[in-house]
Every structure is written in C-alpha cells, then in structure tokens.
Image (cartoon, rainbow, N blue to C red):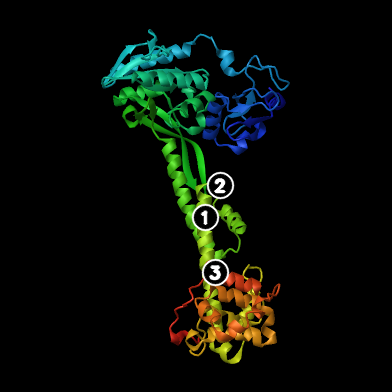
Amino acid sequence: MSDERRLQIPVVQDISNGEYIRASRLADLFEQHEIQTMRSGSKSGRFVCPVCSHGVYLHAVKDSHCGRGHSYHFQHPSGVDCEWKGECKSKGEIYRGVQEGSRHQDMKLLLAETLPQLSGWAVIDVDRYFVFNQDKTLRGKPDLHAQYYGDDIVFEIQLRSETPEIIMRRKQLYADKGWRLLWISADNASLVSEAFSETCLETRQVQKDIAFSNRGNWFIFNKALAERSLAEGRLILLARHWTASVTGNRIEYGWQESLVAIDDLTFSGAEFFYKDFDQQLTEAQAELRETGRQSALELIKKERFSSWDHCLTRTKSLWPSMDFLGEDGEWLNQQFREDYRDRELQMKQWIVKFLRSHNWRKHHKRQPWLEAAERLKNAPFGIQKDQPLAIFEKLLLILGYSLSPHLGPGQKKHIQSCHNFFDYESHFPYRALCEKAISISPYRDDINQDKTMVKRSALRQFVPQSSDLDALFQWFISDPALPIDFGLPLGELHPEQ
C-alpha cells in the first residue's frame, strides 16, 4: 500500500482538546506508549475526520522501514461516506473469522504438556468451555485454564491480530471472575535462543496493544523456554517490557528483555507484569523534574533574567520536558518572580547605600551611578545617567530615610526638603514627585501641619506633567518596597564607593 493511500485521512481533530493532528507526523510527535493511548482513544470517538465529522480509528501497518516496526494512519469505519474514505481493510478485518492454525494448537499443547510437570501447576481444561462474568454480560473461551497453587490463571495464546476492544474485553472478563490473565506469544520461536537477542524479536502491533494493557509487558513461550522450564522445575518466560529511563535531560524509551519465572511477575487487577512501565515513567518524570528544577534554579541565579519570556525560553533549552503550561511553569514563574523581587530589593538598597556614601555625600562623585545606569539601561528601573540625584536625595528624605547623621527625620530634614521644592527654581519641575512622596511618607501629618507648607497650599495644587525622575521614583516606591527605617547602623552610613 502506498503512503498516499495509507494517508487518505491526512489530518484528524482530537475533540478532547480541539487540536488537529497530522497523520504523517504521528511517529515524530508521539512515543509508542502515547500512540497506544491514542489507539484506545480512537475507538471511543476521540478523533474525528475534519471533512465528514465522523469518528475515525488509528490503524497500524507493519513497516520494516520504520524504527518501531509499524506505521500508523487513520481510517473511517465501514459504512461512512466521505471523500477521504479508503477501501482497504484492516488486518483485524482480514483475519476475522479465520480458524486458528496449527501453530496455535501446538502452543496450547506445549503449555498443557509442560505445566503439569512443574511445581504447583494443574491444567483444568484446554479450549473446551465458555466462561462468563457474574452478570453474564461477557463471555470467553480460554485457550488454556490452569491453576497455580490453587489460583486460577488463564493463558491466551496470541498468534494473530486482535483489536484493542477484544483485548480489553477479555481482560475485563477475567478480572470480574478474579482470574489472572496471561497473554502468551510464540512469534519467531525458532529464533529465540539462549542469547535471547533483542534483534531477533519483532514486535507486532497486537503485542504492543497487549503490552500496554499490562503496564508495558508481553511474554513469550516456546519450545526452548519449555525445555528450560522443565530443567528448572518452574515456568520460565521471556518478558519484553517497554521502559522509560532518564538520559541527560530527556526520557528515553525502548523495549528490554528479561528471562523471568512466574514468581517474578506481579499480578494486579487482572494484569501480569514484570516491570511496571507506569511506575517507571512516573519515577523518570519525577527525576527529570527534580533535575530540571535544579538546573532552572542555577540558571536563574546565573543569568539574572530581566524578563519572564527570556527566563522561560532559556529554561526550555535545558529542560525540554518542562510542562510550562502546568505545574512546572507555575513553579518556574514563582522562582523567577522571587529572584526578580530579591534583585529589585537589592537594587533599591544599593541606591540608598550609594546616596549615603562618603564619595557622594562629600564629593558628589557619580561614577558608581553611571556604571549602574549603563549596566541597567535595558532594565525597567528608570535609572539613567544624567538624573538629578540631589533632587532624588530630597525625595528620600521626605520618605523618612536617614542619609547621614545630619540628614534624617531627627533633624526635621523631611520638612526642609519639602520647602526646597517651592524655594528653588531647579526643584519646581519635581513638585508632583514631592507631593507623591508626602502622601506615602510616615511623616505626612507632620509635613502637612507645618505652617510654611500650609501657607503654600495654593502652590501645592500645581502639578507638572512629567520629569526625568518619574520612572525611577515610581519604581523605587513600588512593590517590593524598602521599609522606611532602612535599619543600617550609623557606622554603615558612609560606605566607600
């Protein structure tokens, strides 16, 4: 079948989230276990054809040129009239109603002859009776019904294609009865040797369907394994299990093989499994998340991001699996905001420290400010090279900061600084900032009750439109705000810059 014919439905819509999926990119976008989930979901009407809006299903085709052994495409169910509809039948339809072959019979006979010779086993019947669940809604005829130390175990010999619905129906039937279901394959039996090389085993789609209904496990039994079982006196199987492991900053997936005895397997809810892929994936995701978060924290401290978008982009490069729209993204945003907040506080502390410094107080040396302005020219702090720092000084005094032993609330400098904005022409453009500083100052009542300030009430109504300190002052008083009592001991009021 040509690729063009296989992709007669090139795009489907996932109605669970409204997204469109290109069939040609299935192998690139999804891992094997995710495709298995899609195969189950496609049977429940999750995917629809954009042309006719009918439900479609995900079909698997054996493909030796594909690394996974199968390629996938969507098909319409029979009876649907659509211009995209193909007429090719699925493998399940081709084999429906076909009698079991001699290989199937040979497998049942091999199990029936081997099990009674092993400790704890008894064969109850081989392909003889239908069994029903309690309310008679499900029935099935086990290929082989056995007991292991009194526990009922059903062996289903899988040599032909089965749909996911049939697999899940049988699983439900035996779960309702409290019996354990063990799917057995004998594919490539002649190639399974002592080496049990991974390259000698081909994974068919039905085996993948079975595996992912049993936490990523399927099992092989054949003559070689029967001989080994008899030699050891216990049932030996070859388990093929889908694994998840962390490699670098990604999760790698793949099939692994292990020789196992029946007692090595775990039984839970009608599932027999050797390795629990769901648990492995959860653990791998947790490990990757922990590693990713540690890398993110180190990156935030190192890069000192000035924007959330930059932080997110850089973190994605180190942590590709990050769920940036979910819990991971919320956590990262919180770390960014906390770091950014801490750096803002440090910057505000630096400004006060600079204005308290000996070189600024005695000599008005601006070099540290110029360097900071150059370094932060793209940051939203409003720091610029040519700002009138003497004006900014007065605003800090109005707010109640002590800038030296002689400049602070104890010397009524908050009131004197307010007078400057009405006494000196160079201060006139900044009266609006003076009023804003008064409004949030802990000494506003003291200032507003000052006789001179009361006399100037008419002048205080004048508010200039803007100044070159607006952005800096607004940022300085915004959250996170420094406490008015900066708390530096008097001996630290004159740090050298």
Q: Is residue 266 above or below residue 431?
A: above
Label drawn at residue 40: none
Compared to residue 261, the image places residue 321 above or below, namely below
Q: Residue at x 58, y 52 (%)?
A: 316
Q: Earlier in the sequence, mark 1 or mark 2?
A: 2
Give how far across and how far down residue 9 sits, in percent. 68, 26
Q: At numbered mark 2, what does the secondary structure look like: helix, strand or loop?
A: loop
Up-down: is 224 above or below 132?
A: below
Q: Are marks 1 and 3 in contact (CB under 8 Å)?
A: no
Q: Residue furthest bottom?
A: 362
**How dense is the environment of label 1, judged by Cα within 10 Å: few (below 14), some, or many (20 and up)?**
many
Label 3 sits on residue: 344
The residue that mark 2 highlights is: 325
Amino acid type, residue under disc 1 in the picture: Leu
Q: Is residue 199 left or right of residue 7?
A: left
Reading the image, the residue beneath label 1 is 332
- Comparing 267 with 311, the one in front is 311
User: Callout 2, which amino acid?
Assistant: Leu
- N-terminal of the pair, mark 3 or mark 2, is 2
Question: Quadrant location of residue 302?
Answer: bottom right
Q: Residue at x 44, y 11 (%)?
A: 105
Q: CA distance from mark 1 to mark 2?
A: 10 Å
| Residue 372 visible at all | no
**Spot occupied by residue 363 in the image (x, y as percentages of width and height):** 60, 91
Mark 1 to mark 3 CA distance (whole Å): 18 Å
Q: Nearer the viewer, mark 3 or mark 2?
A: 3
Which comes before the other along the chain, label 1 or label 3? 1
Mark 3 residue crowding within 10 angstroms, few (<14) / some (14–19) / many (20+) = some
Quadrant containing the N terminus is top right
Q: Quadrant of residue 383?
A: bottom right
Q: Considering the image in quadrants, where does the C terminus appear?
A: bottom right
